[in-house]
Amino acid sequence: MSANLAEGESRLLYPPPGLPPGGDGGASAGPADEDLRVVAARHPGRWVATAVVGVLLAMVVSSLVTNDRWEWDVVARYLTWPSILEGAWATVRLTVTASVVGFALGTVLALMRLSRSPLLQAVSWAYTWVFRSVPLLLQLLLWYNLAYLYPVLSLGIPFGPEFLFFDTLDLIDKFWAAILGLGLSQAAYSAEIVRAGILGVDQGQHEAAASLGLPRHRQVRRIILPQAMRSIVPTAVNEVIGLLKGTSIVYVLAYGELFYIVSVIYGRNGRVVPLLIVAAIWYLALTTLITVVQYYVERHYAKGALRTLPPTPVQRVRWELQVGFSRLTGAPVPDGVPPGLAARVRVGRWVAPRTTPTGPTGPKGGAA
Amino acid sequence: MTGGLLEIRGVHKSYGLLEALRGVDLTVRPGEVAAIIGPSGSGKSTLLRAINHLEKVDRGFVSLDGELIGYARRGNTLRELTEREILRRRTRIGFVFQNFNLFPHLTVLENVVEAPIFAQGRPRTEAEAEARELLARVGLADRADDRPRQLSGGQQQRVAIARALALRPAVVLFDEPTSALDPELVGEVLGVIKELAGTGTTLVVVTHEVGFAREIADTVVFMDEGVVVEQGPPADVLDHPVNPRTQAFLEKVL
Ligand SMILES: Nc1ncnc2c1ncn2[C@@H]1O[C@H](COP(=O)(O)OP(=O)(O)OP(=O)(O)O)[C@@H](O)[C@H]1O
Ligand SMILES: [Mg+2]
């Protein structure tokens, strides 16, 4: 008996959910429980809901297929059209560059806001105030017209001599006007996200870092920011997705990003809806990509915050398949599958006596 | 390790209208172990934080081996140190927190080597070798690659002690190192501190464990309402307290 108990977590399932606890003395004590059948719980409400949603889904799919006004052939043709691909690539470039500018500047603004200098605090506050208040569309047009205000930009000593001169029109083309508009306003939002993340890190962490005498920049970069990232990442990804879609506003500058290209094409051929669908599919695909990246970034920063990391989707699918295979064939569950999942092999099937070495959850070998 | 001489003179500290410290005087000689006891809110933590300059004092001064903490003295003027200088001096003082405050995203070894490498500029290989020695000393040689949350509270606090010692400090300050622990984990942490008490490092331990204070302390300091009320060898302060406030406190905790 004691040897039996030492063997396995697989007994955690007992008594089965349906049995009254201790109701059957014979079943809960002796080896008789080896022959019990485990039956999954029934969820009639869930079945009804599933059926309703299933029907609705079928209706949607059928209308998509049968209504030929969607013009799926046109959609398919334009989906990988060279200029569409170029537009999608331009959208990616805008999103990435503006995100980098936005979050780099946002982090600086957040640190300024948290610094002890009243001037830095005030400047950071004022920046956020201005750039959050002025509509993005207006900002974009203003940056694009910077040459009107300052025809020549120069580099030199403040209020002193200047050495390098640039023609504003050369320096700020449509792309950089768009980056200035998107990135600078993104920085205002990012600053608040980063600041909230830093404030969320336990005060004790700041104190421990300070008490060890770590240089200030090391405290921030090594101790505080990595922990702040845990709360920053989900919101930041939201912002990046917003930015991805927000790049479509750049069409006012006639810059060749996805939405502008699409509108040019349907302006010529009149296939408005299919081309809008093409753009939608691309935005969907890019957003999906960002979401996948988010999953792994979050996992990275969860290190240490959780005792054990949750499995990746790939691991989860593999384990489910292995457990399913074992349920069908009675083969032993491979090593590496978590015991909690492996125990599911027993649900809905007769459990082989534990003495059988090849039993589905039996311990490896005869060591016990 | 050689211990430092810690001198605290007339230290005052207020939070708004509340005076947490109202003129604290205390000397801890090199290698001495001082245990600070006293009721909740009496200013024990505030005093430790002032010693480490985590808290700036309003009046008075703290010095370690004659060097003022937080200020440089030239003739009769005190110049406030820059943050960089304060950080550098702080590496001579180890601090062990009540809640450990280990860095959860770093491994145990990374926690211990961070400050020797990046605050003291010691080579990584040397710092890691010494960190492993320290971890062995606190009985955690095999947990170097785990992360703090995978350890028990007692183990975490022992890592925190190793982290503080990695700076080779002249003084180590402990703020109620066992009060966040389950009773059965207290012993292992007190054991590590006791072992440390024999090595010549100056220790200042705020504790609620009167028995422990009696066992390891050379001096017991009783604080109440922001001042040191009574201090002396454990046999005097704990067994024959002179001050009525000390008597009342000890009656309650014993
Ligand atoms: N950051 C702070 N802001 C305002 N008041 C504070 C702060 N820190 C401490 N105090 C107050 O100062 C007084 C002394 O606090 P301190 O933490 O030093 O007490 P303590 O002796 O360590 O108590 P305990 O045994 O409960 O830890 C208390 O009245 C406390 O409320
Ligand atoms: Mg305290």
Image (tube, coloured by chain):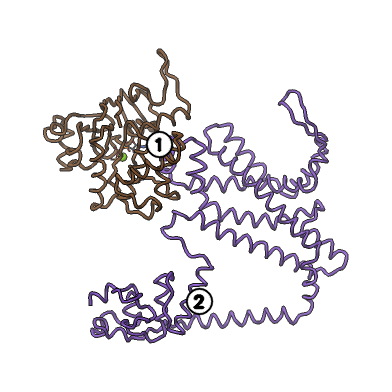
Chain colours: A purple, B brown
x, y percent for residue B111: 41, 45
User: As shown in the figure, which amino acid type bears the numbered disc 2?
Assistant: Leu
Q: Subunit of mark 1?
A: A
Q: Chain of mark 2?
A: A
Report crowding for label 2: few under 14, some 14 to 19, many 20 or more residues within 10 A (C-alpha): few
Give the quarter the ligand 1 occupies: top left
Tell me which residue sits at (39%, 48%) in the image: B108
Q: How many marks?
A: 2
- Pointer 1: residues within 10 angstroms few (<14), some, or many (20+)? many
To which quarter of the image does residue B26 belong? top left
Looking at the rendered structure, the secondary structure element under dot 1 is helix
Q: Is residue A134 visible?
A: yes
Identity of the residue furthest to the top in this view: B75
| Mark 2 lies on residue | A321
Q: Read off the residue under disc 1.
A: A211
Is label 1 within 8 A of ligand 2 (CB to nearest ligand atom)? no
Residue plotted at (22% across, 32% down): B221
Measured in 3D between alpha carbons, the distance from the residue under mark 1 to the one under mark 2, in whole angstroms, is 50 Å
Disc 2 on helix, strand or loop?
helix
Disc 1 marks which amino acid? Ser
Q: In the picture shown, does residue A221 fall above or below A266?
A: above
Q: Quadrant of the C terminus of chain A?
A: bottom left
Asked whether A149 or B139 is in front, the reply is B139
Residue B249 is at least partly visible in this image: no
The spot of residue B196 in percent (x, y) is: 26, 38
Q: Quadrant of residue A204?
A: top left
Q: Quadrant of the N terminus of chain A?
A: bottom left
Question: Residue A226 versus residue A116: which sits nearer the camera?
Answer: A226
Instruction: Residue A82 in the image: state x and y as whole percent.
Output: 81, 63
Q: Nearer the viewer, mark 1 or mark 2?
A: 2
